[in-house]
């Protein structure tokens, strides 16, 4: 009798679990295509742990004993199969419904994003907003330790091409933001290429720059999907940087001379010039890989948010081949320094 009861319950569970086709996911306004279809159990929708990791730009693994781990730049989350709780950064969080293990895939209640304060559901669309990456490692202990490099051009003596491309008001607004200490101020100046390449070569040989990692989501047809994580090899050539990113090769030749005007308005910060140049190189790689356009939003001045995590943002757009509709996005490259590595996380959001 007990065996018959258990069999009946098992049959009810799987017969009442169906694929849900109506619920749609978006991340910062961008459509998300699940790797595994969403499940519905007559009670709630479920998402696979792989999709959860893709959306949060994390890495997941099975740690044994029906436990699964997702590591993101802001959180360490432990799931247990058939349990109605998780451990998030060592704190216990109760779920609305227990997780499910179906055909060796762990499924998580879809409202976990709301539980973690990351998502808001509107009708059949759940829009998820991912937190900006964080790190406890200081970018540089003291900005006064920056190495400053004399240059022909400076914060107060900009190249003439900038005046031709921006109004005086736009230039002044950018300068005021940089002088607040919250942003670095950059423009293209290839006359200092050799000094910057020498600095990068020194960093690659003896610091976290020897282990550079890039992380981004696939983007096709105005939809994001799987998260890609690749280690990067950098070949410093005479007039360019050659990057090997997974199976792709990418070459970048510009130098973004970068100032921290809260410390020095006349001389370039060579450390931040290296960082912002790398950030813009990886932005260009992402833009080119997924055929995004930025000509409508080009600016000769680049502002990079300072702090332990540096962030460089750029507007881009796509044009629908059938309708001619333009969709505008923002690509943001976050630079995160870890103990033994340097991580560049590329995110995209829809305006």
Image: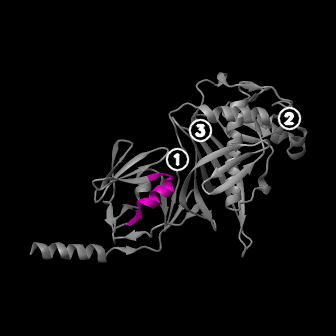
Q: In this view, does 26 lie above or below 345?
A: below
Mark 3 or 2: the one toward you: 3
The span from disc 3 to disc 2 (Cα, nearest Å) is: 33 Å
Q: Distance between the residues labelled 2 and 1?
A: 35 Å
Q: Residue at x 43, y 69 (%)?
A: 38
Tag 2's secondary structure?
loop
How many numbered circles are shown?
A: 3
- Using the image, determine if residue 155 lies above or below residue 56: above
Q: Are marks 2 and 1 in contact (CB under 8 Å)?
A: no
The stretch of residues the image draws in magenta is 45-59
> In this rendering, would 351 be left or right of 300?
left
Q: Name the residue under label 3.
A: 210
SS for callout 1: loop
Give the residue displayed 60% in from the left and 28% down from the top.
Answer: 140
Q: Name the residue under label 1.
A: 131
Q: Which of marks 3 and 1 is in front?
A: 3
Q: How crowded is mark 3: few (under 14 residues within 10 Å), some or many (20 or more)?
A: some
Mark nearer the N terminus (3 vs 1):
1
The reply to whether discs 3 and 1 touch (Cβ–Cβ < 8 Å) is no
**Mark nearer the N terminus (2 vs 1):** 1
Quarter holding the C terminus?
Answer: bottom right
């Amino acid at each position: 009798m007990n065996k018959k009861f258990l069999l009946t319950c098992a049959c009810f569970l799987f017969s009442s679990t169906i694929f849900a086709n109506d619920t749609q996911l978006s991340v910062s306004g961008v459509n998300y295509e699940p790797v595994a279809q969403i499940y519905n159990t007559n009670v709630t929708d479920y998402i696979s742990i792989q999709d959860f990791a893709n959306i949060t730009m994390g890495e997941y693994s099975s740690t044994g004993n029906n436990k699964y781990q997702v590591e993101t730049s802001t959180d360490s989350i432990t799931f247990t199969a058939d349990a109605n709780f998780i451990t998030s950064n060592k704190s216990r969080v109760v779920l609305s419904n227990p997780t499910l293990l179906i055909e060796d895939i762990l499924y998580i209640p879809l409202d976990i994003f709301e539980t973690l304060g990351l998502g808001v559901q509107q009708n059949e669309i759940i829009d998820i907003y991912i937190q900006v990456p964080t790190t406890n490692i200081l970018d540089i202990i003291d900005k006064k330790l920056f190495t400053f490099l004399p240059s022909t051009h400076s914060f107060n003596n900009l190249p003439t091409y900038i005046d031709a491309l921006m109004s005086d008001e736009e230039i002044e607004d950018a300068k005021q933001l940089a002088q607040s200490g919250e942003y670095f101020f950059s423009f293209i100046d290839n006359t200092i290429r050799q000094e910057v390449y020498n600095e990068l070569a020194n960093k690659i040989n003896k610091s976290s720059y020897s282990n550079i990692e890039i992380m981004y989501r696939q983007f096709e047809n105005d939809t994001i999907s799987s998260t890609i994580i690749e280690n990067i090899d950098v070949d410093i050539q005479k007039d360019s940087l050659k990057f090997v990113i997974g199976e792709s090769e990418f070459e970048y030749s510009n130098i973004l001379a970068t100032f921290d005007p809260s410390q020095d308005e006349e001389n370039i910060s060579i450390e931040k010039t290296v960082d912002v140049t790398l950030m813009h190189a990886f932005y260009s790689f992402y833009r080119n890989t997924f055929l995004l356009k930025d000509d409508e939003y080009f600016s000769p001045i680049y502002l990079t948010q300072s702090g332990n995590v540096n962030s460089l943002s750029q507007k881009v757009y796509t044009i629908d081949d059938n309708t001619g509709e333009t969709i505008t996005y923002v690509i943001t490259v976050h630079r995160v320094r870890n103990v033994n590595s340097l991580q560049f996380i590329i995110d995209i959001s829809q305006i």
